[in-house]
Amino acid sequence: MAQIRCIGVLTSGGDAPGMNAAIRAVTRAAIYNNLKVVGIKRGYYGLVYNEMEEFGSKSVSNIIQQGGTILKTARCKEFTTPEGRAKAYENMQQSGIDALVVIGGDGSLSGARIFAEEYDIPIVGLPGTIDNDLGGTDETIGYDTALNTIVEAVDKIRDTATSHERLFLVEVMGHMAGYLALNGAIASGAEAAIIPEMETEIDQLGDLINRGFRKSKNSAIVLVAENPATGGALGLAQRIKEEFPEYDARVTILGHLQRGGSPTAADRILASKMGAQAITALLEGQRNVMIGTKNGELVYVPFSKATKHSSTIDRGDMEIVKILSI
């Protein structure tokens, strides 16, 4: 195996709070181990179009508290083609990059897996996504911050819901995963969470209405995970209008509000530990793995497992939401 002398680092896919902390950790851990670091701009786009610059310790100063990503992120259709990846590999070679650290979600890590297999490149991934939907890890970078943002927003929405005695449907992100909706509901005291993982098991809206929340409350907040199959919160609001016209439903879509903001201490710590471990992994000869966390310990997760959405929603947590909503 060729010796690694230069690490390339990029962020790809949707931005997540804590990505900058991860970039900082990767850069400084590499420099500590006498490795050169190249920052790749706009994800895989920067690899294909050669947008790269050498990073020093000062390049990542004063960024741990910033949301977003200083490396920027963009979609790159060219990288999905063999020709685009060939161009990316050529640019890597010309820049002297021996290995990559890719920070992103399932799409980003899927791209990394294909690239690594085609060109035998050592690549280590970091789970940077607010959705918390990657396999093999208990937490992803950005999830805790997004969850706190949701809770803060729902706390404010509750003031209006209570004043007007309405049913509020609050749509949160998740990319077909219900972790933000479910745990956001528990943390904010919402009356229900409607999540994709349960849609084939029960009529979640019907269950909420049939539980008769009006018996003990004049208002209710329901967290809804985005879901094209049901139309999300807007689709449910239309259904309420047609099937349960006695309820005055309102919709709030939090949208990209959830992606921004200064990362929480938990996300800064997670990103920093994972970033440093990524360099350790490469020096150990690891490749095609994501740094994950299991029961508080950092673990290596094969890309093939990481990119499979884990639908291990705890049904007991759904029951907790129901019990605490009475």
Image: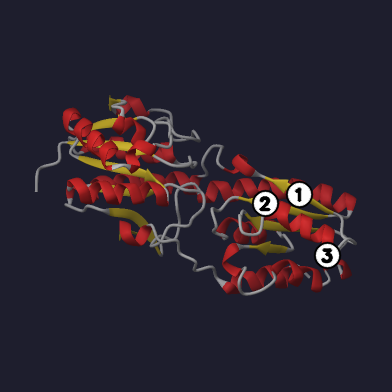
Q: In this view, does 51 lie to the left or right of 248?
A: left
Going by the numbered disc 2, the residue's amino acid type is Glu
Could you tell me which residue is drawn at 21 percent across and 53 percent down? 286
- Residue 242 in the image, given as x and y percentages of width and height: 83, 60
Q: Quadrant of the C terminus?
A: bottom right
Kindly indicate whether the residue at mark 1 contacts the one at mark 2 (C-beta within 8 angstroms).
yes
Per the image, the residue denoted by label 2 is: 171
Q: Is residue 95 left or right of residue 309?
A: left
Query: Mark 2 vs mark 1: which is more N-terminal?
Result: 2
Q: How far apart are marks 3 and 2 (CA)?
A: 20 Å
Q: Which of 246 and 172 is in front in this view?
A: 246
- Residue 285 in the image, given as x and y percentages of width and height: 16, 52
Q: Residues within 10 Å of mark 1 (few under 14, many from 20)?
A: some
Q: Residues within 10 Å of mark 3 (few under 14, many from 20)?
A: few
- Residue 265 in the image, given as x and y percentages of width and height: 49, 45
Going by the numbered disc 1, the residue's amino acid type is Val
Could you tell me which residue is drawn at 71 percent across and 73 percent down? 323
